[in-house]
Image: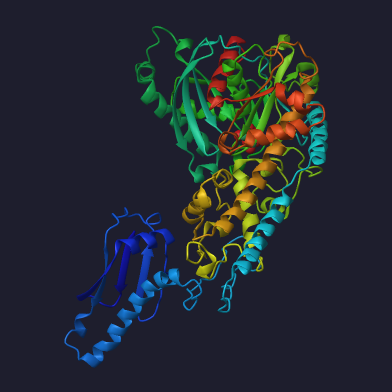
Amino acid sequence: MYLSCTLTTFSDSRLRTTIPPQEIEYQRRRRATFTHIDSSNADIRFVDPRRSQEPAPPSKATTITVSVPSRLTGLSLGQFLPVLALILALIVQFFVPVYRRFNYQDQALRPVREAVCPSTPFEPPTCLPPPALAPQELHTFDSLSSRNMALAEAAQKVAKEFDYTTAQLNEAVEEFLREMDEGLAQDGTSLSQIPTYVTAVPNGTEKGLYMSVDLGGTNFRVCSIQLHGNTTFSLTQSKVKIPTEIMTAATAEELFAFLAKQIQLFLKEHHTEHYEGHMERIATGSTEKGYREQEIFSLGFTFSFPVHQIGINKGLLMRWTKGFDIADAIGRDVCGLLQTEIDKLDLPVRVAALVNDTVGTLMARSYTSPGKTGTLVGAIFGTGTNGAYVEKLARVTKLVARKENAEVGAYDASTGEMVVNTEWGSFDNALAVLPNTPYDAALDAESVNPGIQMFEKRVSGMFLGEVLRRAIVALLQTNEVPLFKDENSSLNELHSTTQVGRDSPLFARWGLDSSFLSVAHGDASPGLRITRQALDRDLGVSAASVEDAEAIKVMAAAVGRRAARLSAVALGAIVLESGRLDTVTGDEEADVVDIGVDGSLVEFYPGFEDYIREALREINGIGPAGEKRIRIGIAKDGSGVGAALSALVAGKQNLAK
Ligand code: BGC
């Protein structure tokens, strides 16, 4: 704990008083934050070490130093007395909480409370007036518990808004199946059902050295992958955060030049010999050995946005999602755009396959998964959400129509199957079956793509934090709900008042990271300490009470559970459509329906898979018996390996130009 006391206009001689270690420990526990007592230029602060950059000094006696101004030295006793009185008042102020500890009913001193002022996007009111200080009443245990009950009830009420019943679940599955069919037959549908030209999934015996890059959200990854042919691989990778200005650049060239530059840096660092040899050949213009195809890396390009794919390494961008917004790129071939920038740098790389991250996940899971059955679905539950699955080629009827218009690239039809990228983030954009709370509606209205990706806006990590934030702020703005309103320190077992800072991220759009949901939902610490720390550290809510944290936990759990139940709609519908549950061989391993998943939500949100499973059991046609046959396995960073595998498959089929 760091304790300071200054009289800001003073500078010279000092008066000292010493605080005993027990008091420091007590203050540490109560995490006192006296905010600006602005009388006579005095400012006392107790700085919580968790909020301070400074390391906490060992708990030893701490000295409050009060400086006395040089111009006052030599003053008469009469002139000096007011200063002394002020100093004494400050010291008394410090010890009052100690006194209060032993005198629960003494409410004489009540701290200053700041106005709660949301900056955006909640209007009206734009700025909540500081809540009126309660009359000086005695708080009995009864009034405390009815207050806490009111908060718990309010939180439960919000949680209830996120309920998604069994009936709704089954209705949504029906709609999903309908949209799957519609999307396989024609373009321009809600569920895009994009044919990927990938007609085979790996079986674990594939070998070779490949490259892949992955553009899908916050980061750009460059990898080289050595496939060992025994379901294992070695991977070298580098990852860079995509600067915000690149995500919304004016031209596509800016984005793709940035990506090509990262590939160059990766090659220089991890494949130095290969890179330098190649550059030397170019520099000397040597053609002695000819242009040797095998010296060029085949690269799988994981591009996790909706693309109208017209070949294994050709796809036109349909729309951006996840905060990207570069209008210039819409309708253009993303492989061509990347290849152009790679060629400008003379890199030994050819873009051989274009894959969505879900396709990559499906390929990677199929390569590594145990057992005899090929994986059915690859799904991402991360920043965005989507799934790809193995469909019977004959059902992808829109390919036939495209063929007639000569709009279709080559593919190997012998397997009778094709991986289809559903782009399920856009399932039910019309909101026929999706839930729509006021928080969902407001989020959508203020998003960069209103009316689009409606499923994703209720399921994926990019949005869940924002949904929860809006629910919390709505409660905060309801005067009668005592959330974060312990303006009297006797209401809070920390013996401090709860403060929501003016600039709390709670009041800023996207201010609440979805990882907070995982923290709150998974918090089993005594007194929900972890959630309260996160509230303080990440959201500027100091000294939240246990009841506040409980309310937040209830709401976070509801938002997460709804996301998982909706995820089950998509997975369940695909499992049903595949017909894989219709046959039973009796061989447990052969009867498994395998699903590969990746993404922060499924990996880190506590119980996400359990909630999915709970919902799967409620789906007609799956039930408890079907759910048992469904195996869900993480394909960590699968998209990188999967893209490499797609490049390999493309090479084998000799389809890439
Ligand atoms: C994109 C998908 C992608 C998913 C997961 C969505 O926003 O539209 O193409 O697969 O995010 O990354």
Picture quarter with ligand 1: top right
Q: Position of residue 98 (x, y in %)?
A: 40, 69
Q: Where on the picture, by quarter, is residue 391? A: top right
In front here: 625 or 573?
A: 625
In front here: 22 or 131?
A: 22
Q: Where on the picture, by quarter, is residue 178? A: top right
Quadrant of the rendering where the N terminus is positioned: bottom left
Query: What residue occupies the far left of the structure in this picture?
Result: 74
In this figure, which colouring scheme has been used for the structure? Answer: rainbow
What residue is drawn where x is 77% and y is 21%? 578
Q: Where on the picture, by quarter, is residue 316? A: top right
Q: Position of residue 581 (x, y in %)?
A: 77, 20
Q: Classify 350 as above or below 248.
A: above
What residue is drawn where x is 30% and y is 75%? 7
Query: What residue occupies the far top of the structure in this picture?
Result: 289
Count the numbered circles shown.
Answer: 0
In front here: 334 or 528?
A: 528
Quadrant of the rendering where the C terminus is positioned: top right
Q: Position of residue 223 (x, y in %)?
A: 47, 24
Q: Position of residue 605 (x, y in %)?
A: 58, 39
Q: Classify 614 as above or below 226.
A: below
Would residue 508 be seen by someone viewing this image from the given angle? no
Would residue 268 be seen by someone viewing this image from the given angle? yes
